[in-house]
Amino acid sequence: MKRLAYQSGGNPPYQKQQSRKAVDDLPYVSTHSHIRVRKYWRYIFLGVVLLAKVFLILSIYYYVEYRHSQKQQQQILAPAAAASNKLFR
């Protein structure tokens, strides 16, 4: 099995570690000084961000609906509670 030995531009050549088993190294010199991310990771990240925004919007919507239903229940129960208080006075 062959392994790529990575070295960046003007850095000293890649040195093998003695503890690693004997593997033939293929030298690879990069002209870029930064790590290049494959294109599909960009789309995965975009999908995760969009899903997070969708879930955030849905959670806000359901929270508002829940609060609205709670207020409606309180308005319905308030006259009944006032009437029962008059009976026990």
Image (cartoon, helix red, strand yellow):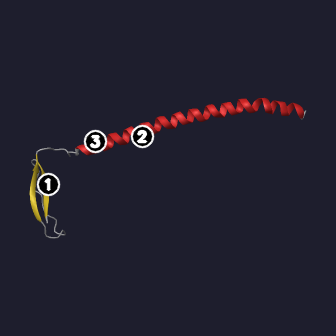
Label annotation for residue 81: none
x 73%, y 31%: residue: 76
Q: Percent x, y for residue 62?
A: 55, 36
Residue 12 at least partly seen? no
Q: Quadrant of the C terminus?
A: top right
Report which residue position mark 1 lands on.
6
Q: Is residue 74 left or right of residue 81?
A: left
The image quadrant that residue 79 belongs to is top right
| Nearer to us in this view, 83 or 5 | 83
**Please, is residue 44 above or below residue 61 in the view?**
below
Check disc 1 and give the amino acid type.
Tyr
Check disc 3 and give the amino acid type.
Arg
Q: Percent x, y for residue 16?
A: 13, 63
Q: SS class of the residue under badge 1?
A: strand
The image quadrant that residue 39 belongs to is top left
Q: Quadrant of the N terminus?
A: bottom left
x 13%, y 70%: residue: 22
Q: Local crowd at mark 1 within 10 Å, few (<14), some, or many (≥20)?
A: some
**Please, is residue 64 above or below residue 5 in the view?**
above
Check disc 2 and give the amino acid type.
Ala
Report which residue position mark 3 lands on.
42
Distance in Å between CA atoms under marks 3 and 1: 24 Å
Report which residue position mark 2 lands on.
52
Lower sequence index among marks 2 and 3: 3
In this view, the mark in front (3 or 1): 3
Q: Local crowd at mark 3 within 10 Å, few (<14), some, or many (≥20)?
A: few
Q: Is residue 62 left or right of residue 8?
A: right
**Please, is residue 52 above or below residue 71 in the view?**
below
Q: SS class of the residue under badge 2?
A: helix
Q: Percent x, y for residue 6?
A: 14, 54
Q: Percent x, y for residue 77?
A: 75, 33
